[in-house]
C-alpha cells in the first residue's frame, strides 16, 4: 500500500448463475466467446469436454461444478486459465467486466460455501452495485481440476 491508497488488482469478472467470480488478469490467458468444445466419452463430473487452443488440446471444466453454483442458463464463454505450466479451460456463463478490485475489502467466504478452498474470499465489486464478488484462487482451482481429469502442461522455457 502506497500513501494509504487501497491495493487494487486487475481482475476478470465472470458470471456463473447469479454469482460473480473474479480471476486475476495474470491467470487468464484468454476469454473466448462460444467455445467449440469436443465431447469426452465417460467424462467424470465437472468435465465439460476438450477444446483446441493455440495448437493444444485443453481440458475444459464446468464452472458450476467448480464452484458448486447452479446455472441460470447456458454457458457461453471459456476462460483459458494458466498458472505456471498448467493450463485448463473454465466454461462460465459470461464475462461481465475487467476491473480493479480493492482487495483490502476481502472477507472470508461464508462458512460451508467453499469446501475445496478455491475461493480466497469475497469482496464488494465497485462496478456491480455493491454485489459481492468471489475472488478465485486459480492455482487451487487447477489442482481441483487436475484431480478430476488430466490437464495440458508444458515445460518451462
Image (spheres, rainbow, N blue to C red):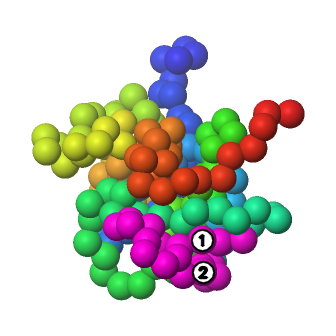
Residue 135 in percent (x, y) is at 40, 44
Return the residue found at the far top: 3
The number of numbered badges drawn on the structure is 2
Please give left or right for residue 89 compared with residue 73 in the image.
Answer: right
Residue shown at the point (78%, 37%) measured from the top left: 155
| Residue designated by label 1 | 50
Residue 1 in percent (x, y) is at 53, 18
Residue 129 on the magenta span: no
**Element marked by disc 1:** strand
The answer to whether the residues at label 2 and label 1 have Cβ atoms under 8 Å apart is yes
* Disc marking residue 38: 2
- Crowding at mark 2 (Cα within 10 Å: few <14, some 14-19, many 20+): some
- Tell me how far mark 2 sits from mark 1, CA to CA: 5 Å
The answer to whether residue 157 is seen in the rendering is yes
Q: Earlier in the sequence, mark 2 or mark 1?
A: 2
The answer to which of 133 and 137 lies nearer the viewer is 137
Residue 43 in percent (x, y) is at 43, 71
Amino acid at each position: 500500500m502506497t500513501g494509504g491508497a487501497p491495493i487494487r488488482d486487475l481482475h476478470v469478472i465472470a458470471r456463473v448463475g447469479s454469482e460473480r467470480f473474479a480471476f486475476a488478469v495474470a491467470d487468464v490467458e484468454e476469454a473466448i466467446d462460444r467455445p467449440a468444445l469436443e465431447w469426452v466419452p465417460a467424462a467424470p463430473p465437472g468435465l465439460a469436454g476438450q477444446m483446441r487452443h493455440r495448437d493444444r488440446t485443453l481440458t475444459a471444466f464446468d464452472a458450476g461444478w467448480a464452484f458448486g453454483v447452479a446455472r441460470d442458463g447456458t454457458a457461453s464463454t471459456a476462460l483459458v486459465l494458466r498458472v505456471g505450466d498448467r493450463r485448463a479451460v473454465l466454461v462460465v456463463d459470461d464475462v461481465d467486466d475487467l476491473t480493479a478490485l480493492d482487495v483490502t475489502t476481502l472477507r472470508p467466504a461464508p462458512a460451508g460455501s467453499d469446501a475445496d478452498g478455491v475461493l480466497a474470499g469475497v469482496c464488494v465489486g465497485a462496478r456491480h452495485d455493491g454485489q459481492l464478488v468471489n475472488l478465485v484462487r486459480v492455482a487451487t482451482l487447477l489442482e481441483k481440476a487436475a484431480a478430476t481429469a488430466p490437464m495440458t502442461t508444458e515445460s518451462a522455457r
